[in-house]
Amino acid sequence: MERTPGRRRASRPQRETGAIRQQPWKQLVLPYAPIEVLSKDEVEAIHDAALIILEEVGMRVLKPEARALYRSAGADVDESTHRVRMDRALIAERLKTVPATFELRARNPQRNLKVGGRHCILSSVGGPAYVMDNDRGRRSGTYAEMCDYLKLIQSFDILHQEGGGPFEAMDLNPNTRHLDLYYAEITLLDKNWQPQTLGTGRTIDALEMVAISLGTTREELATEMPVFTGIINTNSPLQLDEPMAEGLIALAEHGQVNVITPFTLAGAMSPVTLPGALAQQHAEALAGIVLTQIVRPGVPVMYGGFTSNVDMRSGAPAFGTPEYTMAAQITGQLCRLIGVPFRSSNVTAANAVDAQSAYESAMSLWGCLMGGANLVLHAAGWLGGGLTASFEKLVIDCEMLQMMAAYFEPPQVNAETLALDAIREVGPAGHFFGAAHTMQRYERAFYSPLVSNWDNYDTWVERGQVTARERANTIWKKVLANYEQPPLDPGIDVALRDYMERRKREGGSPLN
Amino acid sequence: MERTPGRRRASRPQRETGAIRQQPWKQLVLPYAPIEVLSKDEVEAIHDAALIILEEVGMRVLKPEARALYRSAGADVDESTHRVRMDRALIAERLKTVPATFELRARNPQRNLKVGGRHCILSSVGGPAYVMDNDRGRRSGTYAEMCDYLKLIQSFDILHQEGGGPFEAMDLNPNTRHLDLYYAEITLLDKNWQPQTLGTGRTIDALEMVAISLGTTREELATEMPVFTGIINTNSPLQLDEPMAEGLIALAEHGQVNVITPFTLAGAMSPVTLPGALAQQHAEALAGIVLTQIVRPGVPVMYGGFTSNVDMRSGAPAFGTPEYTMAAQITGQLCRLIGVPFRSSNVTAANAVDAQSAYESAMSLWGCLMGGANLVLHAAGWLGGGLTASFEKLVIDCEMLQMMAAYFEPPQVNAETLALDAIREVGPAGHFFGAAHTMQRYERAFYSPLVSNWDNYDTWVERGQVTARERANTIWKKVLANYEQPPLDPGIDVALRDYMERRKREGGSPLN
């Protein structure tokens, strides 16, 4: 038994908070040693297994241009099976040109981002098919709703980057809706944003529009600070399809950052054992990283770890599992071994914004953040295995991210913070509420939550027994109502609209 | 954007699961380096500040017998102010006799527990005033409900120890209800359990009854493997009250384990700065640890870290905050510095079993488990700042604990798990469901959840959109229905009842 704490109250009145209170814009910097799940020897054994896979089994590369690039660099290419095999010397040589750190440009230079080392970028959910909120449940989204979601991403300072479109705007033409998305990403945010990378057309459209937004040209982008991290998924096991190869090549040619992300679900698209799944993930990542360096030596590139496991009883993908956590942290070890910045994700299989969604996200976040991730995609908003972007989950995740950001700021230890004078002043059985040491610091002493309710039970009941999910609903509506659009040069706006209209007249970028 | 995963299904039918699936009984062993929030120098600065506090300010010790013990060991005792001051040499000398590791005896020897080093015990919630479930909300509990809760604690193998009474049985006489609690703890569980330590009477009753249950005597307990970890809270700041001093002395005299736990809420009972709060916590813990070694040199003792912060706007205690996480991990560093096993807790201020309760618990659990805790009290069931024991939170916490236990088992890396043959066999664009490597391992390859639902959205809707909180309700009822009482020698049962009846006739142990 432990004596239950009494709930003493401070004499301080509750401060008024007109807008939401949030932590100020600041990139995360990991202050602790990353968690090492495996020994150095074990990490090297996985790396070695990946090299054997690429030497003996190889990657199936569907795009002829990509195969030609590999061949030009000395890889062994079998045109009848589309199989590309490469030896460890070729890989080691190409890894040498990968930059360990770089910066990413945002429309607002105050929001430029550092990549690599101990720096971490938190990026919003990208790619879901559906949108969901407490009021209307899950549904196909519209462009207007997607714009609302983007406004929230702009408003939460804990999100450093937009993740490539929170959900599909199903009321728009599928061949041109990426243009509307890009226009919204540029005009509703001043943060860095991710392009869609499925095929050359969408990638080039993104490059053209971001160039307009920055007052430059697509051709000049390659000579400047990169603006795009584009997600390139391999088709695990061991295949790179045509649209993804096109996206990869177009991004690399333009000096942009490919985030090579195998989707290796253990037991389905990769071996049921975690080391095997990671060896295969590593092989696929290496193949993609090498290709970027063949296209343009020295172009920045990232390694995306997305290994999770399936439910072996149903085949359903599982996320935020203990296996996911370990896979993320081992991927961090693999990234540090080969010197490539690490991308990970905040994921859950839960369909509701309930306790499961929070504990699976927590397992993900501790996995990637303490694994040394440099980019956390889907850091806020992901629900239901990534098929849904949730308005309430976005808010809950921002709270969890802010808590991790505060945890990443360990206390200063010095005479002032050790507070011996205050302890002497208060003495045994006294209290610290009124001490000068407390009064001078209380306003900013502790993390101030976004969603968490710390009322005692009776107060909580009086105020309507509002749960975290319901509070999140109130919060996003309040934030949306207070959204302020970042300024944009009217000439740039006209140029963006002109480009978009022209491309729509041309038919956009059909996928097939 | 990232391509949304398709939800491939295995051909495997879902296996029948009559009883719940859970991980087998096994103590946790931390396989990773604990997270070090502060540098070695900073940890030593906190230790040094604590020594200065004990030298200059001292502890207020209300019980004359305790003051006499301190005086006998060379401390400076001021009888007019009840102030006990001790120098660093005395403290260093007394720390030398503290055992770094020991074992705890359970009624079932298979459930004996290792304490110290990398071993970790997960213990159920202890001390709340109220009970809560989905069906009836929060209320004062009865003895029958308390027994149900104890049956669940016995049934979940992830819980290694009972935490000292999950909530008060308000239908029983307050002067004797601890006897009924002890009887229930002994007869409904075969796990180790915690006594109530408020005053000599309750502590002696616990010692007598546990001795009966183990076929020994209270006097002989001191010569055997310890059976009790008893929580001793100081009255922060810097005070040890009479009932707690009595409990401490009685436990130590009988060779039992005091868990010295200052309740240092930063900003209220300790400085608003974390290093100051921890310096004071450390001073109070050292004072208590020293007293145990004065009473009985070499008696096992633990250091409980319970530093959290208050909400400076309302004075309400906050739990599972970033400050809590850091405080837990720094306490782990302090414990390793002085060689005393570390106790921590899984805590939240949330009043509902919602996302907040899960993310605050996750922050707590990562704080204590990656901080190297040897005992996690309140590991399952705690809600609402510790005023409530929740049936559903118990289940959710067991899931979170099981996930951490699985995370504490990093994969073996060898030829079989690297699975190169399976990768060769499946090849590019194949799938692993049917591979021999998968078939041989799929049943036990991954963590199998207790509460988590991994259905896709449509299936989840068809099955009634059941949230984690509702699933937890179903699970505890199923587990309770399947509870099996561990066997007990009928002679011991009679002796326990005789003791209890006699003590009830005598009036029990009134608190005042």
Image: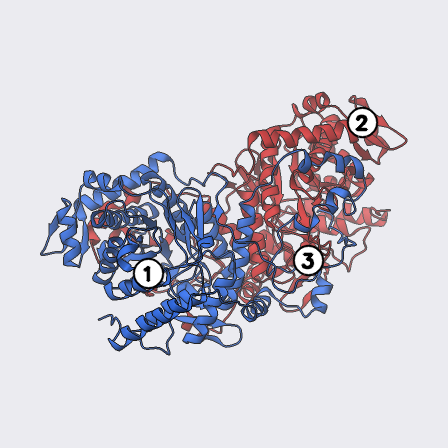
Chain colours: A blue, B red
Q: Which residue is mark 1?
A: A211
Q: Residue at x 26, y 77 (%)?
A: A505
Q: Residue furthest left?
A: A80
Amino acid at the residue labelled 2: Leu
User: Is the same chain shared between marks 3 and 2?
Assistant: yes
Residue A7 is situated, as x and y percent measured from the top left of the image, at 75, 54
Q: Residue at x 26, y 41 (%)?
A: A95
Q: Is residue B13 visible?
A: yes
Q: Residue at x 36, y 35 (%)?
A: A40
The residue tagged with tag 1: helix, strand or loop?
A: helix
The residue tagged with tag 3: helix, strand or loop?
A: strand
Q: Which residue is mark 3?
A: B388
Question: Which of the two discs, 3 and 1, sits closer to the camera?
Answer: 1
In the image, A490 versus A222, the foreground residue is: A490
- Tell me where residue A138 sits by quadrant: bottom left
Of the two numbered discs 3 and 2 on the same chain, state the one appearing first in sequence: 2
Residue B436 is situated, as x and y percent measured from the top left of the image, at 25, 52
**Other residues around mark 1 within 10 Å, as few (<14) / some (14–19) / many (≥20):** some
- Tell me where residue B459 sits by quadrant: bottom left
The residue tagged with tag 2: helix, strand or loop?
A: helix
Amino acid at the residue labelled 1: Ala
Q: In the rendered view, does A418 fall on the left or right side of A196?
A: right
Q: Residue furthest right?
A: B80
Placement of B110 over or under A207, stated as above or below: above
Placement of B154 over or under A125, stated as above or below: above
